[in-house]
Amino acid sequence: MTALFVTESAIGHLNATFRLARQLQQDGYYVVYAQNALPELAQHIVKQGFAIYPLQSFPFGLGMDEVQNRSRSESYLETLLDRLSGRDLKARTADWQQIMTTLKPSLILLDAFLSTDYVVLYPFLATHPAKVVLIQTRLSTYDDGQMPPLNSQLIPRQDNLREIRKVWKQYYMGRGLLRAEQAVKYMGHGPHQQVHRAFKQNALPDIYRLRYDKVFHAGIDNLPEWIMAPREFDFPNRQLLPHQQYLGTMPDLDRTEDLPPAYERLLQYLMLEQQANPAIKLLYVSLGTVANIHLKPCVLIQFFAGLLEVVAAQPNWRLVMAVGGDLKNQLPPLPGNAFLFERVPQLHLLPQCNVFITHGGLNSVLEARALNVPMLVLPLNLRWDQPGNAARVVAMGQGRLGDVRSLLGTKLTDTIKTLLSGDYRKKDEHSSPTISYQS
């Protein structure tokens, strides 16, 4: 038996699936990841003990062709040509045909972020039957009538239902305007039109209709959707659709991580320091592997510089920073109690930390939650799920929410001290901090 994972080529999406993949291995499945991932991501998958199947195409109908053509001198014309000719759909179809005839998977676990792949896959299931499940690496993205959108920092209460509906209305209006703009720009071949044409072309039955009463990409009705998060992390009144269920498999605390020698030496030093002086507190900041995609580098540099100033003024604080390769050489000189890395083995470091400063990706939030590390959540992008994750952290008394643009100086110092003292643990059911910027 072969279990095939087809996920977005991003570390957060991959890490969200590894615990489930291990369970399937134990149940006798041969686990394969179909990816067009960068070499370091492919290596990460292999280190977890899973096989790789290389893809030649990119996800269909999600606007990825715009991203791929961005570096070309005639990027718009290249993208328009791709869409008029159906090149992306043909390439994705060829990949799925090869997958089904070569791997013959009995179970296909398709990232909900790539839900449009089911439209491409469906015709091949007639000759190569397989169970298909959508893997949701976020919380539920659907509009259940009473929960705010997952890209909102609102905390639901009985007295703010009208505000919640207003936020949903604004989201739907913005999405409608974007669809209209894309339709005009690409002569009726925007991503929305591409997917609907393929749906009809591949003769999907109405039972699998496309659903848009949700944030982010289209959903597929009546296709099982497993949410890779524990039920208790979501708001209590969340209502799921009949085909949705919480699987609760994140985080994967058994994930294999490399321990770079420089990191190991530093951690040994810090642990010895704490043994000699229990007043020393370890802070860890990581705003995700693609932080500079969410916000301009200058905004991130300003925050990190402000954080370094705050830490320099606190002799008993130690700061470990993971900032990625793009920003590593753009930061000001470090004080003696701050240590800079491109990446660190997060699962290895978190158990030693007193405070985790994070952008609010679901993987990171659930890992810190599982290890009982208080969080300062700084959402970078209001288009994704970071604000919604932050709202749940605040509501459940597991941390604080901040704005990366304005949380500086004394305000930042006081917030970290609150987290270190434990005063953050009181659940906040009556306030919803406002983040006004757009990415």
Image: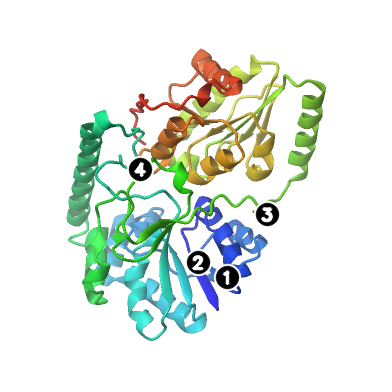
Q: Residues within 10 Å of mark 4 (few under 14, many from 20)?
A: many
- The residue carrying mark 4 is 150
- The residue carrying mark 3 is 256
Q: Position of residue 249 (x, y in %)?
A: 53, 54
Quadrant housing residue 20: bottom right
Q: Is residue 407 visible?
A: yes
On screen, residue 350 versus residue 403, left or right, reads right
Viewer-nearest residue: 52 or 55: 52
Amino acid found under the numbered disc labelled 4 = Leu
State how the image is colored. rainbow
Quadrant containing the N terminus is bottom right
Question: Which residue is at 62% across, 58% downward?
Answer: 44
On screen, residue 122 versus residue 348, left or right, reads left
Calculate the distance from the C-alpha at mark 2 to the C-alpha at mark 3: 18 Å
Quadrant housing residue 168: top left
- The residue carrying mark 2 is 5
Amino acid found under the numbered disc labelled 2 = Phe
Viewer-nearest residue: 71 or 231: 231
| Sequence-first disc among 3 and 4 | 4
Compared with 196, 332 (above or below) is above
| Sequence-first disc among 1 and 2 | 2
Q: Is residue 380 visible?
A: no
- The residue carrying mark 1 is 31
Calculate the distance from the C-alpha at mark 3 to the C-alpha at mark 4: 30 Å
Question: Which residue is at 72% across, 19% downward?
Answer: 279
Calculate the distance from the C-alpha at mark 1 to the C-alpha at mark 2: 8 Å
Q: Are marks 1 and 2 in contact (CB under 8 Å)?
A: yes
Q: Are marks 3 and 1 in contact (CB under 8 Å)?
A: no
